[in-house]
Image (cartoon, rainbow, N blue to C red):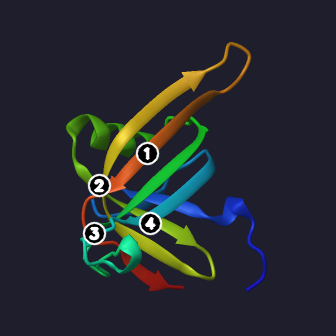
Amino acid sequence: MAALAGKDVLLKIDDGTGVMITIGGLRTRQMTFSADAVDVTDQDSPGRWRELLGGAGARHAAISGSGLFRDGASDEAMRLGFFAGNVVTLAFIVPGYGQFKGPFCLTALAYKADHAGAALFDLTAESAGAIVFTAL
C-alpha cells in the first residue's frame, strides 16, 4: 500500500437517522486502541518479575480530532450527542485499508477561536462497546 494523505482519512458520525455523515472541517484525527493489563504476579513469580494474564483485560478505543468549525449537520450531531449524553456511532475510515466502526460516548467537545483566526473545535470520544473492523 502506498503512502496515504492524512486528509483522506475520514471520521463519520451517525446523524441520528442511521446515515453516516463525514465530520467536516477536521484537520487532525486519531484513533487509539488500548487494553488493560491484568497483573497476576505473586511471591512465586520467577525472579519477582511481573506476570500478566493474556487476554483478560478490557479493550477500549479512543478517537480524537480537531478542525475548523463549520456549523454543519455533523457539528449538530456531535453537539446533540454530547449534551444528551447519548452513545453515538462513529466510523474511522482509512481508505484502502479499512473502517473501524462502533458505539462511542463523546467525552469532550471544545470550541475555541482566536480574534484574528478561524473558529475551531476539538472532540474526544471513548468506545462504549465492541468496535468492528471492515476491510476496504
Q: Of the residues under marks 4 and 3, which one precedes in the sequence?
A: 4
Numbered tag placed on residue 40 in the rendering: none
Q: CA distance from mark 2 to mark 3?
A: 29 Å
Picture coordinates of residue 55 (x, y %)?
Answer: 30, 81
Badge 3: few (under 14), some or many (20 or more) residues near its Cα, within 10 Å? some
Q: Nearer the viewer, residue 65 or 10?
A: 65
Residue holding disc 4:
33
Q: Amino acid at mark 1?
A: Thr
Q: CA distance from mark 2 to mark 4?
A: 18 Å
Task: Tell me if I can see residue 72 in this picture.
Answer: no
Residue holding disc 2:
88
Residue holding disc 3:
38
Q: CA distance from mark 3 to mark 1?
A: 26 Å
Residue holding disc 1:
124
Which residue is most to the top?
Answer: 115
At x 41% / y 65%, what residue is drawn? Answer: 34
The quarter of the picture where the N terminus appears is bottom right
Q: Amino acid at mark 2?
A: Val
Q: Nearer the viewer, residue 91 or 18?
A: 91
For marks 2 and 4, give the one nearer the viewer.
4
Q: Amino acid at mark 3?
A: Val
Callout 2–callout 4 Cβ contact below 8 Å: no
Picture coordinates of residue 20 (x, y %)?
Answer: 40, 63
For marks 3 and 1, give the one nearer the viewer.
3
At x 43% / y 45%, what residue is drawn? Answer: 124
For marks 1 and 2, give the one nearer the viewer.
1
Q: Is residue 57 left or right of residue 29?
A: left
Badge 2: few (under 14), some or many (20 or more) residues near its Cα, within 10 Å? many
